[in-house]
Amino acid sequence: MTDLEAILDDSRAALLAGDMARLADLADALATAEPPSDPAALHRLRRKAERNAQLLAAALKGIRAARRRLQDLTGQGRSSTYDAQGRRGEIGAAPPPPARRL
């Protein structure tokens, strides 16, 4: 196993644990690590990097969902409803202006 593989494995563990501070530390190590010249090792690295990319995308999706939920909860007393098409609207919000043709 190369140093780069160890960094990718540590990154995976940090992603699964939600340890974003550890990920930041590992990013610096990842940027300075030397890739191996062995084709088999490069193939393993690619698989691990792709796996980590999927985990990172899922983590970002979760963070965005949490941010939206927090914004909903701290919406300064605003309430929202949903129409028949599933579009959200705020109670008491002014309706959009009518569309005009030019």
Image: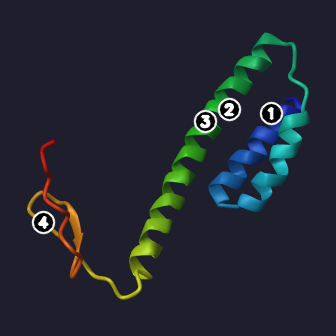
Left or right, 93 with reference to 26: left
What is the crowding at mark 2: few (fewer than 14 residues within 10 Å), some, or many (at least 20)? some
CA gap, disc 1 and disc 2: 8 Å
Q: Earlier in the sequence, mark 4 or mark 2?
A: 2
> Where residue 85 sits: x, y (%)?
12, 57
Which residue is painted at 79% across and 53% down in the image?
24
What is the crowding at mark 3: few (fewer than 14 residues within 10 Å), some, or many (at least 20)? few
Q: Which of marks 1 and 3 is nearer the N terminus?
A: 1
- For residue 51, the mark is 3
Q: Name the residue under label 4.
A: 83
Verify CB contact (< 8 Å) between mark 4 and mark 1.
Answer: no
Q: Quadrant of the C terminus?
A: top left
Left or right, 83 with reference to 64: left
Q: Nearer the viewer, residue 54 or 61?
A: 61
Q: Nearer the viewer, residue 101 or 39?
A: 101
- The image quadrant of residue 97 is bottom left
Element type where label 2 sits in the image = helix
Element type where label 3 sits in the image = helix
Element type where label 4 sits in the image = loop
Q: Mark 2 points at which residue?
A: 48
- Judged from this view, the residue extending furthest toward the left is 84
In the rendered structure, which amino acid carries the disc numbered 2? Lys
Left or right, 44 with reference to 85: right
- For residue 5, the mark is 1
Verify CB contact (< 8 Å) between mark 2 and mark 3.
Answer: yes
Verify CB contact (< 8 Å) between mark 1 and mark 2.
Answer: yes
CA gap, disc 3 and disc 4: 39 Å
In the rendered structure, which amino acid carries the disc numbered 1? Glu
Q: Which of 87 and 19 is in front in this view?
A: 87
Q: Earlier in the sequence, mark 3 or mark 4?
A: 3
Verify CB contact (< 8 Å) between mark 4 and mark 2.
Answer: no
- For residue 68, the mark is none
